[in-house]
Image: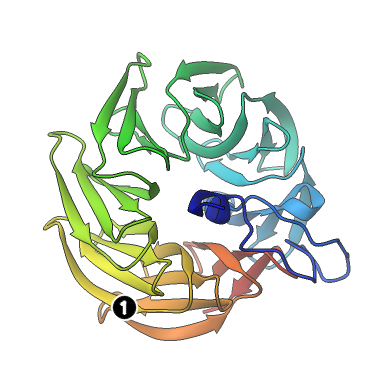
Amino acid sequence: MGLKSVMRWGLLLASTSGVVRADAQIGAEPATTLINRGAIVYSKSLDKMYVVDQMHDAVLAVRADGAVKRVKIGVTPDAIAMNDRTAMVYVASPDGKSVSVIDGRSDAVVATLPMAGLPYAIAVDELANKVYVASTYSNMLAVIDGATNAVSKVKTGSADAVVVDAARKQVYLMGYESDTITVVKQATGEVAKIPAGEMHLWGVALDGRTLLVTHVQGATVEAIDVESGPSTTIATGAMPCAVAVNPSTGLAYVANYGDGSVTAIDVRRGVAVVTVKVGRHPEGIAVDPASGLVYVVNAGDGTVSEIEEMSLRVVKTMSAGEHPYAVAVNAKDHTVYVANLGQAAFTMLGR
């Protein structure tokens, strides 16, 4: 089995106690499942965290006070995107070949939209009120009109990640089995390709005009200038698989799955600053700019490493449940939430 199958299709996760359990009282047979770092998202306007609950074909809406509502959707939700301006939540369900639309004010499903292929990556342009959905095993990018839920399509090729660049009115598509990034003009649907350095791309993030793309079967990140075109190759740890940026400091953080480390990169200078040891097999990463902290989920030992930006060192290691794989931070109270593949669908870590 190749790396793509292991990391995306979730054979990292099976356990004798069941998979993705939302609570310990409900039993389930062990299973495999898709994993996606977009499985958890915070809504600032609603002050809620939304987490996929695959075992129950649902999404969990978690209020800041800890109250949880389970919202039933189609089949095996995998990734979530949020439009905070409209309070609408969009959930990609690969097995159901659909995107469910949830009204975050009532946490009720208001539409289920059929998709081509297996919808896996999803992103929202809040200002334009558009939702972009890339499907594995489909060459079409679906574009959902947030006002009407009408779906149009653009032929782009398969993609594993979608990034919206609202400032330049374009969308970037990244595919694992590619050495290029696909650029889609939002107004016209025009498609172009830009080099991404080498094959096997996995993590992607945008910081200003710089698109950061990890080479998961190597040990580098490509920093691409999306306006002028040139790129810089930056050394990281082994198997860089996730990247997050702090636009306030100009630092990016890369989780290196292969050697249990995080590389901090000065995006403006295009150089690595330091590589910090964390836990085993880090898979997901999130930055809390207001507190100056970075959170890294370590799937191999069930922990979260807290990195202080000022010192660029690990200041705390917290237990995070079985196989944590995605993380998000409440921007108001700075509570950390982790999506798990284990006895609970998520773990809440207080500050």
What residue lies at 15% left-to-right and 35% top-to-bottom?
229
Q: Is residue 344 above or below residue 196?
A: below
Q: Residue furthest top?
A: 188
Please tell me whether mark 1 sits on a helix, a strand or a loop: strand
Residue 6: horizontal and vertical position, in percent?
Answer: 56, 56
| Residue at numbered disc 1 | 276
Residue 66 visible in the shown view:
yes
Residue visible at 36% across and 48% down?
204
Q: How is the image coloured?
A: rainbow
Vertically, is 233 above or below 85? below
Image spot of residue 236 (x, y percent): 27, 65
Quadrant location of residue 169? top left
Residue pictured at 36% horizontal, 67% vertical? 290
Give the farthest residue toward the front.
1
Residue 173 is left or right of residue 116, and the answer is left
Q: Quadrant of residue 245?
A: bottom left
- Residue 258: image location, x then y, percent: 41, 68
Q: Quadrant of residue 40?
A: bottom right
Q: Nearer the viewer, residue 190 or 329?
A: 190
Few, some or many C-alpha atoms within 10 Å of disc 1 (few <14, some 14-19, many ≥20)?
some
Q: Residue at x 62, y 55 (%)?
A: 10
The three-letter code of the residue at mark 1 reads Val
Q: Is residue 128 left or right of residue 224?
A: right
In this rendering, the count of numbered labels is 1
Q: Is residue 123 above or below residue 346?
A: above
Residue 179's spot in the image, x, y percent? Answer: 31, 39
Above or below for 317 versus 4: below
* Residue 41 visible within the image: no
In the rendered structure, the answer to whether residue 262 lies left or right of residue 250 reads right
Q: From the viewer's perspective, is 117 left or right of 178?
A: right
- Residue sitting nearer the eye, 259 or 130: 259
